[in-house]
Amino acid sequence: MDAQAQALAKIPSQALAKTPSGVEGLDEITGGGLPQGRCCLVCGGAGSGKTLFGITFLAEGALRYGETGVFICFEETERELSVNAASLGYDLEKLKAENKLAVDRIRVERSEIAETGDYDLEGLFIRIGYAIKTVGAKRVVLDTIETLFSGFSNTAILRAELRRLFAWLKEQGVTSVITGERGEGALTRHGLEEYVSDCVILLDHRVVEQVATRRLRVVKYRGAAHGADEYPFLIDASGISVLPVTSLVLAHEAPNERTPTGVAALDEMLGGKGFWRGSSILVSGAAGTGKSTLAAHFVEAACARGEKAILFAFEESPRQIVRNMASVGIDLQRWIDAGLLRIASTRPTFSGVETHLARMHRDIEDFAPAVVAIDPIYTLGFVGGLAQERIMLLRLVDFLKSRGITAMLTAAEAGVSGEIDQAGVSSLMDAWIQTRVTEQDGERRRSLFILKARGIAHSSAVRGFALTSQGLKLLDARAGAGT
């Protein structure tokens, strides 16, 4: 390497400055947010969430990051926009009153536009510029660009004015989000916007087998590395959130602390201390073998230690779970009342697995539990032989590990001694408990054993157990399988 090359190598590269988007999970994918001072195109079909994305970008910018914004709408009225924002929990009228947001509706009538060679957007620039100066805006949203150019068929004029618009926004030093409708064979109707944008985000609202799923993909991001896969995202009363990306490297912390199971005799089988904190535990078995009861013990023990816990249930309502567990001496209601336990029950057919996962991520971020139980993962469709479903489970496990959360997942096996897909599920788990029911002398007898527990010297005995009014009780190892 010559002297000049050595000198250049010592000069640090200028990293692209980024503006936080305010959309949960998106900044992880983009490595910090949207390109600061540049234009980002958000495109998608009708109902994909483009306008709500723009609202979130501005509202979160004002509320969380202290950056004022301007919303230019070409279709909806200011009143309609405020009502839509309220569905996400944002009060645009209050933000406007506090001079943190300016909203301007520009009415564009196709019949009033004369397509001539000297047509330009100077009038639009003046109005946007005035709004920016009024609130000192750092963020601008234009919704939607098709309306602005709906009367033009001359590609040359269209391309020139698009370039002028994007260049003018950059000159103002604002970070812009411009929404666009999905086109035929192109990302947008005109097929030009994506080429002049510095960042392009595609929102997709698809229906597969009568189940709707929303997905987001960063198609383009000049000057920065980004996740290029499709990521599920959720729109609900809490706003927009994107399912966080799976870590590229296995760099999770490995705590030396142990987490008790809630069943003292089972802890003894694990060296007397339970599982490693932050580990993922699979409990599999046929119907009626006590999997849900073991999961209830697990979350109850966490609450008794003063830790928060979430139980995600997909087969029973919270009240039904509380009642049924009370019959075996597990009082979950006291922990719900104490604010230490949350039971989130959803029908598995309500939405696709990606939407379920996005909701679970949001609940976990909001409640910040130390322990999570999912009962069962089969109902979510994780174990169906599809690569995408396994990826979804991997993302969930990765997400829990990254936050040091100890998780117990139950899975129903087919038949009395059926096996689950070990390559798709069990290999992701740090520990695996299997429960069984056998018939002996005209009675059904329950038993369990530990198939694996990484990093823990554990018992290989098959222990019988009984479901009593005081909970799950393991029988003496010499008694074999018990009732």
Image (spheres, rainbow, N blue to C red):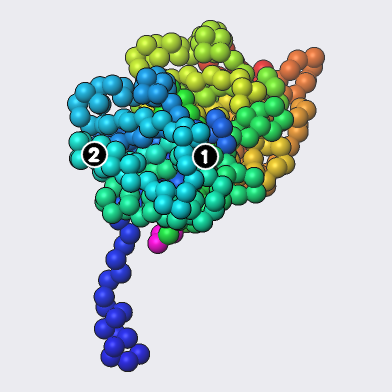
Q: Residue at x 40, y 36 (%)?
A: 54
**Quadrant of the rendered image containing residue 462:** top right
Residue 200 x %, y %: 48, 50
Looking at the picture, tell me which residue is in the foreground, 112 or 220.
Answer: 112
Q: Quadrant of the C terminus?
A: top right
Q: Main secondary structure of the magenta part?
A: loop
Residue 17 seen in the current view: yes
Q: Secondary structure at mark 1?
A: loop
Q: Position of residue 203 (x, y in %)?
A: 53, 40
- Is residue 460 at least partly visible in the picture? no
The total number of labels drawn is 2
Q: Which residue: 53% across, 45% down?
A: 152
The image quadrant where one finds the N terminus is: bottom left
Q: CA distance from mark 2 to mark 1?
A: 24 Å
Give the left or right position of residue 339, taking residue 331 as reference. left
Residue 166 on the magenta span: no
Q: Amino acid at mark 1?
A: Ser
Where does the image place residue 88, in percent across and percent down from the top left? 40, 24
Q: Is residue 467 left or right of residue 331?
A: right
* Disc 2 and disc 1 in contact, CB within 8 angstroms: no
Kindly identify the residue that appears in the image at 35 percent across and 55 percent down: 167
Disc number placed over residue 252 in the picture, else none: none
Q: Is residue 97 left or right of residue 42?
A: left
Which segment did they paint magenta? 223-227
Give residue 76's quadrant in the image.
top left
Q: Residues within 10 Å of mark 1 (few under 14, many from 20)?
A: some
Farthest residue in the right direction?
442
Q: Which residue is mark 2?
A: 130
Q: Which residue is mark 1?
A: 150
